[in-house]
């Protein structure tokens, strides 16, 4: 059975290093293959890094600006323009709150929740639609020939959601233009107007009131 | 050693191997016992977590055993319980033997060992009752982290003392890796705790610091010590020097330079600046340099000689660990290629890579050293050769099943996630891969069987050491080290 003692390990490997350190004929710090391999790796990886260094230049630029003696945060701070959002994208995200009943397809559930597709309730009167969302709706309602009897919660200040004018306008614009619906958008100012006109309303609407 | 022998003062005499072993026996055996107990615990917790992937309702009615607590408990038990205890045992053994130094006060080390394990227990309990910090591998609450830090200081100091008493003129490659890791961990742990837990940095910085720490606990602590163990046991059991040993120092320095940034590649495809991801991917590809050198050292030492090499369980585990290290290095290149990570990123593939790193490489290498050192410390061969064989084969088969099924599950999962049209809901995706995860559960069950065999073997060996033959017989047994290893 072969094997080495711990002292053997030290002396044998110590000798290997000692032998290597002795001056030799010629120039042989690194065999050519190793030199080529390491240099190629460094070159390829450097090229890759330079091509994929997104954000590094901006970060370094910002760091140099902040570190500069003459830096004044009030003067040099980047001017922030108005925030531009895509109402459809925001509305799609907000619609997650509606999809449990009206379904991701907007088709509702037969007998339980009315569809949002191809109905005048969604694509028709804008003020009526805003009112329903702000204060909710309960009792029987006829949509596309079927009658539903349920309760939709309020998304305005009288309900638990308490959405802003912007949020309500986004989700309404979304449902008016998705699934083949092609009605015009609803802007936040419209929602604000309806909200101001119906401030004393505390209970959900019924169909006869609308 | 070149100085002429002076008068018979005790310091001028080189210590006997038996004296060295006696001076470290108690703390090393304690570390081995604690490590193996943690290994079994960690794998059982990992098994519960895997069952919950397939059956989410399993043990979900109690807050203490929900998935969100079981997973960090399994991970921390594996790294800080098994990994660190085993690493301490390996470090102390290699340092004492390769430095030919006697540990002056083993009681000191034992205190550190006891408090380290108390710290890990406290930390796991903290996670269990909901005090987890929620950061990868820094989940243990602050009170446990403080205890770990202090006890690491005690154990680390005793290893430094061994180095300071070194009686050998040379420094072997295993010692470079061991000593470097010894000083890297406090640095990592301080930065990790300060930046992620106490500093509470937000946003992108948090993800970057967390990924850096989580990878480096492997790359700068567990991996170097496991590499040191392989460098130590291969020449020792095969009886021939490391092939291409003159390259080992280039391998070490390039490993130290590039390994630390490799963790940033796990952020590829996530919302961090592009150059951070590019840095991680670049570092992973530069790791080809140390991988090439270390691979040459290992493979040519293992298979290069014509003479029949040594055998025995220690060598079998160490060989498996060495090959796993090389395989892990190549796999990580594949998974950090942009064409591949668009599918595999943030899927079960990262879990598979954890198993390759932590189990197939680090754990198998540490187990190899434990199979080597326990018979020498207790002075008797392993109680049961059958249990050793059972342990080896169930570990190999178990690890292979777990890694392969997780990679398949991750690939299916990633493809489904990228195909939103066909799989709009989470449940649709989960139904695609859950079949593979049943395989993972079975693989973990296989691992547990092997580790229980290992645990029983260790317990019997320690029982015999405590209540078996008297101490004096150890020295008479020692001159035939080969006889101390069972050859099943």
Image (cartoon, rainbow, N blue to C red):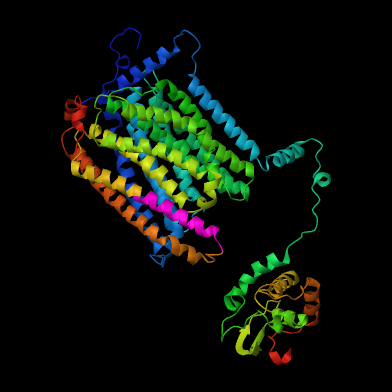
Residue A60 drawn at (x, y percent): 71, 38
Would residue B174 be visible to someone looking at this image? no
Of helix, strand and loop, which mostly describes the magenta segment? helix
In the image, what residue occupies the spot 81% across and 77% down?
Answer: A193
Q: Is residue B418 magenta?
A: yes
Q: Quadrant of the N terminus of chain B?
A: top left
| Location of residue B444 with respect to B173 vertically, above or below | below
Please identify the quarter of the rendering in which residue B321 is found.
Answer: top left
- Image check: A62 left or right of B26? right
Would residue B130 be visible to someone looking at this image? yes
In the image, what residue occupies the spot 65% across and 87% down?
Answer: A143
Please identify the quarter of the rendering in which residue B11 is found.
Answer: top left
| Location of residue B35 with respect to B102 vertically, above or below | below
- Image check: B33 left or right of A87? left
Q: Is A9 or B123 nearer to us in this picture?
A: A9
Q: Is A116 or B2 nearer to us in this picture?
A: A116
Q: Quadrant of the C terminus of chain B?
A: top left
Residue B476 drawn at (x, y percent): 17, 26
Please identify the quarter of the rendering in which residue B165 is found.
Answer: top left
What is the span of residues highlighted in magenta in the rendered image? B401-420
Residue A69 drawn at (x, y percent): 79, 35
Q: Is residue B79 magenta?
A: no
Residue B406 drawn at (x, y percent): 41, 52
| Location of residue A23 with respect to B45 vertically, above or below | above
- Image check: B5 left or right of B149? left
Number of marks in the image? 0
In the image, what residue occupies the spot 61% across and 46% down?
Answer: B205
């Amino acid at each position: 059975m072969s094997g080495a003692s711990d002292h053997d390990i030290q002396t044998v490997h110590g000798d290997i290093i000692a032998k290597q350190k002795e001056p030799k004929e010629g120039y042989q710090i690194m065999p050519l293959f190793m030199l080529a391999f390491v240099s190629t790796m460094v070159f390829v990886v450097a090229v890759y890094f330079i091509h994929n260094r997104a954000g590094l230049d901006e970060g370094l630029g910002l760091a140099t600006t902040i570190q500069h003696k003459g830096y004044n945060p009030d003067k040099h701070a980047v001017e922030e323009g108005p925030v531009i959002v895509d109402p459809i994208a925001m509305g799609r995200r907000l619609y997650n709150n509606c999809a449990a009943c009206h379904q991701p397809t907007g088709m509702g559930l037969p007998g339980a929740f009315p569809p949002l597709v191809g109905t005048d309730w969604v694509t028709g009167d804008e003020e009526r639609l805003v009112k329903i969302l702000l204060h909710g709706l309960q009792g029987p309602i006829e949509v596309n020939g079927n009658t539903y009897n349920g309760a939709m919660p309020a998304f305005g200040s009288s309900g638990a959601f308490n959405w802003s004018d912007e949020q309500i306008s986004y989700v309404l614009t979304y449902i008016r233009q998705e699934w083949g619906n092609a009605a015009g958008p609803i802007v936040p100012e419209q929602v604000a107007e309806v909200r101001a006109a119906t401030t004393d309303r505390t209970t959900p609407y019924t169909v006869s009131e609308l | 050693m070149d100085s002429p022998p002076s008068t018979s003062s005790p310091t001028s005499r080189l210590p006997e191997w038996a004296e060295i072993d006696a001076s470290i026996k108690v703390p090393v055996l304690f570390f081995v016992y604690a490590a193996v107990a943690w290994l079994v615990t960690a794998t059982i917790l990992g098994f519960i977590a895997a069952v919950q992937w397939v059956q989410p309702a399993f043990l979900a009615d109690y807050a203490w055993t929900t998935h969100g607590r079981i997973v960090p408990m399994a991970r921390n038990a594996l790294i800080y319980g098994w990994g660190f205890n085993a690493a301490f045992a390996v470090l102390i053994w290699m340092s004492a033997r390769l430095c030919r130094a006697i540990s002056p006060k083993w009681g000191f080390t034992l205190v550190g060992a006891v408090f380290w394990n108390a710290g890990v227990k406290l930390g796991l309990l903290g996670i269990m009752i909901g005090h987890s910090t929620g950061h990868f591998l820094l989940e243990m609450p602050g009170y446990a982290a403080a205890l770990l830090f202090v006890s690491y200081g005690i154990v680390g100091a005793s290893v430094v003392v061994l180095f300071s008493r070194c009686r050998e003129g040379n420094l072997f490659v295993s010692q470079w890796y061991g000593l470097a890791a010894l000083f890297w961990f406090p640095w990592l742990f301080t930065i990790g705790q300060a930046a992620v837990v106490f500093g509470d940095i937000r946003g992108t910085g948090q993800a970057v610091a967390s990924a850096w720490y989580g990878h480096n606990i492997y790359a700068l602590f567990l991996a170097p010590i496991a590499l040191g163990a392989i460098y130590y046991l291969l020449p020792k059991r095969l009886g021939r020097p490391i092939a291409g040993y003159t390259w080992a120092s280039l391998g070490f320095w390039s490993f130290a330079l590039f390994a630390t940034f490799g963790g940033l590649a796990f952020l590829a495809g996530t919302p961090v600046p592009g150059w951070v991801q590019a840095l991680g991917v670049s570092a992973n590809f530069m790791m080809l340099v140390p991988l090439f050198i270390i691979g040459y050292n290992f493979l040519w030492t293992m298979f290069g000689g014509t003479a029949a090499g040594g055998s025995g369980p220690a060598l079998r585990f160490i060989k498996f660990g060495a090959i796993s290290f090389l395989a892990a290095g190549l796999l990580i290149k594949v998974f950090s290629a942009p064409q591949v990570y668009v599918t595999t990123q943030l899927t079960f593939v990262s879990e598979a890579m954890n198993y390759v790193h932590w189990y197939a490489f680090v754990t198998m290498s540490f187990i190899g050293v434990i199979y080597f050192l326990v018979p020498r410390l207790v002075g008797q061969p392993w109680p049961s050769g059958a249990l050793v064989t059972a342990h080896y084969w169930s570990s190999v088969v178990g690890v292979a099943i777990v890694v392969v099924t997780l990679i398949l599950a991750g690939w299916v999962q990633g493809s489904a996630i990228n195909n939103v049209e066909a799989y709009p809901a989470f449940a649709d995706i989960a139904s695609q891969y859950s079949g593979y995860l049943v395989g993972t559960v079975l693989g973990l069950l296989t691992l547990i069987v092997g580790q229980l065999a290992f645990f029983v073997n260790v317990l019997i060996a320690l029982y015999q050491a405590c209540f078996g033959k008297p101490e004096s017989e150890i020295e008479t047994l020692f001159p035939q080290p080969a006889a101390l290893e069972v050859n099943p």
